[in-house]
Every structure is written in structure tokens, then in C-alpha cells.
Amino acid sequence: MQTLYNGKAKTLFAGPSPDTIIIFFKDTVTAGNGVKHATIPGKGALTAQISIKLFEMLKDSVPSHYIKKLDAQSFLAKKLQILPLEVVVRNYATGSIVKRLGLPRGQAFQPPLVEFFYKSDALHDPLLCLAHIQALGLATPHELAQMETYARHTNALLTDYFWALGLKLIDMKLEFGKTPDGTLLLADELSPDTMRLWDARTHESFDKDVFREDKGDLLTAYREVARRMGL
Amino acid sequence: MQTLYNGKAKTLFAGPSPDTIIIFFKDTVTAGNGVKHATIPGKGALTAQISIKLFEMLKDSVPSHYIKKLDAQSFLAKKLQILPLEVVVRNYATGSIVKRLGLPRGQAFQPPLVEFFYKSDALHDPLLCLAHIQALGLATPHELAQMETYARHTNALLTDYFWALGLKLIDMKLEFGKTPDGTLLLADELSPDTMRLWDARTHESFDKDVFREDKGDLLTAYREVARRMGL
């Protein structure tokens, strides 16, 4: 298989047709812009299975790159031109925004807060407002509005879904891309690597914060999410 | 006179009536969140006179706190509740945005870029998008739209004015406040302490960058701005 891109947590291979790719979920986990990293056998299969189930769940509501499951650790997706933006949806304040704006951890955002960050390791992913995105020519006003709509819709659906499993969706990072004909699609993954999930009662973390903050065993946490999802 | 607030570059005194204040321009100059500072006799009179002339020029176009000149170093203003926001208008990229977004210095913004920053020394004045400002309850959507309109209008008028004097208005920082009845007004000062002015031909700085970057004598630079303004 031809490797198209070897990322921190996923490898992208050329798919069976030129407009498809195979997304393979690796067992590596990184934090702090790659400074902290580890290999945790079994992690890739968990993030793959969780992503597959969530993309399938969203299928009729939010257009995405997901096509079908291939095996335990990979799925087939549409080949996109990925926009250099991270779209972050926050239901509660935690992580970087607590330090950045001096907010109390756990404060609710009503409505959920949608933020855009410039995907640039060299610049440390700076925050962008709509005016910056347009000045940099990274997306059109229509694409921005569409991304925000898809992000809010994804957030509403996943919030309800996880709530029923006793999990609070705290925040998540989404990425988007465009097909050659310009159609905007939700891309990347949907897993505890890219979203924060807290137990609804105890507020225990079931996401990458377990690794980021050395709060226990990452695999145990991800397995519990998968178990509640019926995987 | 009763001191209401002793800032880095200005002191605010109680005015002759409870709804007024006296803004006194000090000879102190600071940069880098107060880390670099100096006293330059004559600077306060220059920033005061330049501010007075610019506020008078804007009088019929942008509602502001300015009432009248008092003496060489102070003017009378309406007492406002100042919003904790710095509104930055950029015509060309320079300063912090060059590092933040990796832009080439001198790149033009068309339309001018309007940014909001949270006035907080402790948090180092972080960038805020409209959604943050609303989440933090710092201003209403109507106030934000009004600030942006006033900022763009001020920028357009001052850009034309300085262009005729052979100076390019690169960027500027504005502040706004509200009267007790909720009227939004342009506040603070309008001087080379709060805006960047480059000679239109040589791109030599005639603003606080002279002090920030040790590029020469600040007083000489400010005097040249005053001279071109007919002061």
C-alpha cells in the first residue's frame, strides 16, 4: 500500500480508487505538540472502532469522509483536500482555554463555544477569528458557516448519544476537507483522542487527558468508552 | 484633584462635574506589558496635543469621550465605564501578528483587520473572537458591531488624514466605554503611543516602536508627527 501521509496517530494509505484513502489508526499516542509520546498496543483498534461507530451514527445528519469499515484498525474514506483548521467545540471549559482566558474549569458554555485554530506546528496552532481566516484565505465565509453548522450539529448529536451512556462530552476537535468538486465534509477521526469525555457522575476522564495528565491507564479508559458504546 | 486611576501613560482625575474626568498625559513610556519603561520629558504634552487634535477632527464622525482641551498636557472627557477590550485595527501586518500568524511584515490587509483583545495583564491580553466576548459577557452583539463600525470609520478617516501628511497609518489600538445611559463612545487616546505611523516613502517609524525597538529618539519622532499635523 502506498503511504500518503504518516501522522502522529494515523497513517493514510492510497485507497482502491484515486478518490479514496485508507485511514489506519496507530497505537501511538502523543500530547503537547508531540513532546510526550508513547506506544500503547490496542489503542489504535479502540480509536478506530469508536470512530467508525460514531461516523456511522452521524451518516444521515453530517456529511463526512467516512465510507466503510475495512478491518479492526482502519476504515475507507473519501480523499479530501484537508483545510488547515482545527474546529474546536466546547461545552465546558477545560484544557487550554482555562489558562488562556482565566475561566473556572468546568464552566458551561451555553451556547457551545466554537473556535478555529490554524493547523501549524511551527506557530503552535494559534487561535483564528473569522476575519483572520478570511485574511489568510484559508476558507470562504460560506465554508466557515458550513463548518460551524456541521460542528454544532455533530456536537449536539454526540452530546445526546454520550449522555445516554453516562458520559459528558466536554469538548472536541474536528477537521474538515473538500472533495475535488468543492463539497465540504467532516474528516479526520471521532474518538477519545480528539474529544474529552467525563463520567457524568464522577467527572473522571475517559479520554487522552488520562495520558496527558498521567491520570491512569489509557487503554482501560478507552475500553470503558468502547464497552459503553456496545463495541 | 482627586486621582481616579494612575495608568502607565496617563492619570485620570475627577472632573469638575461627576460625569467628567480629566485625562492627564504623563511623560512615562512603557512597552512589553510594562517591562521596559522610561520617562521622557515633553512626551506627555506631545501625545496630549496629538490626541486632542485627532479627537477634534473625528468629532462629527465618531462619538467619543472627548469634551475639550484643558491645557498642554490634559483634556476634559466624559466619565465612562471602560469595556475591558482593546480593539486593534490593522492596515498592514507588523508587530505581534507577524509572529502569531507567520505573516510577512508589511503585508496589507484589505479590508483592514479588526481584532479584539481581552484587557488583562495577568492573562497577557489574549485574542478574543466574537463568541468568546459573548461567552465572557464582555459586550453585547450590538455593542461589538458598533465598536467595529466606529473602529473602521476612525481608521478610514485617520488613514486619509495621515496619508496627506506623508504618513501611513499601519495599525492602532482603540478603547471604548459606555456612559451611564449605555451610549458607546470611543475613549482613551489617539497618539503615536497607540498607533503605528510610518513615513509613506521611507517606512521609518514615527511611533512607540522607536522606543520599543531602540530605533532612535522618541521625542524627535513624536515632534515630527506633531509638526506635520501643524501643532
Image: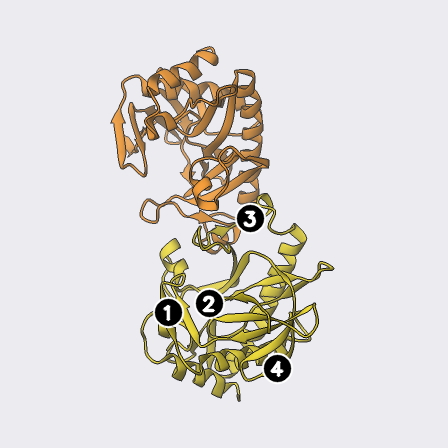
Chain colours: A yellow, B orange
Q: Foreground mark, 3 or 4?
A: 4
Q: Position of residue B187 (x, y in %)?
A: 44, 32
The chain carrying label 2 is A
The chain carrying label 1 is A
What amino acid is at disc 2?
A: Lys
**Label 3, label 4: how far apart the Cα atoms are:** 47 Å
The residue sitting at 26% across, 31% down in the picture is B37
Quarter of the rendering occupied by the C terminus of chain B: top left
Q: Position of residue B150 (x, y in %)?
A: 55, 34
Please say if B100 is above or below A112: above
What amino acid is at disc 1?
A: His
What amino acid is at disc 4?
A: Leu
Q: Confirm or deny contact between disc 3 and disc 2 (CB under 8 A).
A: no
Q: Secondary structure at mark 2?
A: loop
Which residue has dot 2 on it? A8
The residue sitting at 44% across, 50% down in the picture is A123
Q: Secondary structure at mark 4?
A: strand
Please say if A75 is above or below B127: below
Which residue has dot 3 on it? B141
**Label 3, label 2: how far apart the Cα atoms are:** 39 Å
Q: Secondary structure at mark 1?
A: strand
Question: Which mark, by number, is residue A70?
Answer: 4
Q: Position of residue B11 (x, y in %)?
A: 30, 29
Q: Nearer the viewer, residue A83 or B163?
A: A83
Instruction: Identify the mark nearer the N-term, 1 or 2.
Output: 2
Badges 1 and 4, same chain: yes
Q: Confirm or deny contact between disc 2 and disc 4 (CB under 8 A).
A: no
What amino acid is at disc 3?
A: Pro
Q: Foreground mark, 3 or 1?
A: 1
